Amino acid sequence: MKNQKLIEALNNCIAHCNYCSDACLDTENIKMMVDCIRTDRACAEVCSTTVKLLAMDSEFAKAMVEKCHEICKKCAEECGKHDHQHCKDCAEACKKCAEACEAYLA
């Protein structure tokens, strides 16, 4: 499939963001995790839409990859602020996804 490497990075990012947001709901001080949860959820949604547009070879795919690159960087930054392992793993997946977006856009 065309764009397979980017699609794999996006799907990995989606999985980590969904897991991270869910795991954050189980933390003791949930108020300090609100931004992380919201950013995770938004990132997963943008990545999911991007996967669909890439799979359709849509004319809008490039614009979504640009937006995806932006939100993945923001999500990596937000998750990187926390010490939970799920946040660290999510930050790494988002960083790799942002890099895959950059490669696609180059």
Image (tube, helix red, strand yellow):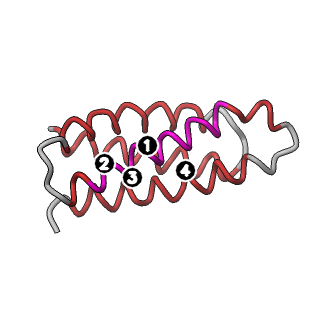
Residue 62, percent from left and from top: 18, 40
Q: Say which element carries label 2.
A: helix
Which residue is label 2 attached to?
50
Find the magenta span and give its range.
Answer: 35-52
Which residue reaches farthest right? 28
Q: Measure how far apart labels 4 and 2 are at the Cα level.
A: 15 Å
Nearer-N-terminus badge (2/1)? 2
Which is nearer the eye, 36 or 42? 42
Q: Say which element carries label 3.
A: helix
- Seen at 47% across and 51% down, the residue is 93
Residue 40, percent from left and from top: 56, 42
What residue type is disc 4 on?
Cys
Q: Measure how far apart labels 1 and 3 are at the Cα level.
A: 16 Å
Name the front one of labels 4 and 2: 2
Mark 3 closeness class: few <14, some 14–19, many ≥20 residues within 10 Å: some
Left or right: where 57 falls relative to 17:
left
Nearer-N-terminus badge (1/3)? 3
- Discs 1, 3 touching: Cβ within 8 Å: no
Residue 96, percent from left and from top: 39, 48
- Discs 2, 3 touching: Cβ within 8 Å: yes
Which residue is label 4 attached to?
17
Nearer-N-terminus badge (4/2)? 4
- Seen at 47% across and 48% down, the residue is 44
Residue 45, percent from left and from top: 45, 46
Mark 2 closeness class: few <14, some 14–19, many ≥20 residues within 10 Å: many
Q: Measure how far apart labels 2 and 3 are at the Cα level.
A: 5 Å
Name the front one of labels 4 and 3: 3
Q: Quadrant of the C terminus?
A: top left
- Seen at 61% across and 47% down, the residue is 88
Which residue is label 3 attached to?
48
**72 above or below 92?**
above
- Discs 2, 1 touching: Cβ within 8 Å: no
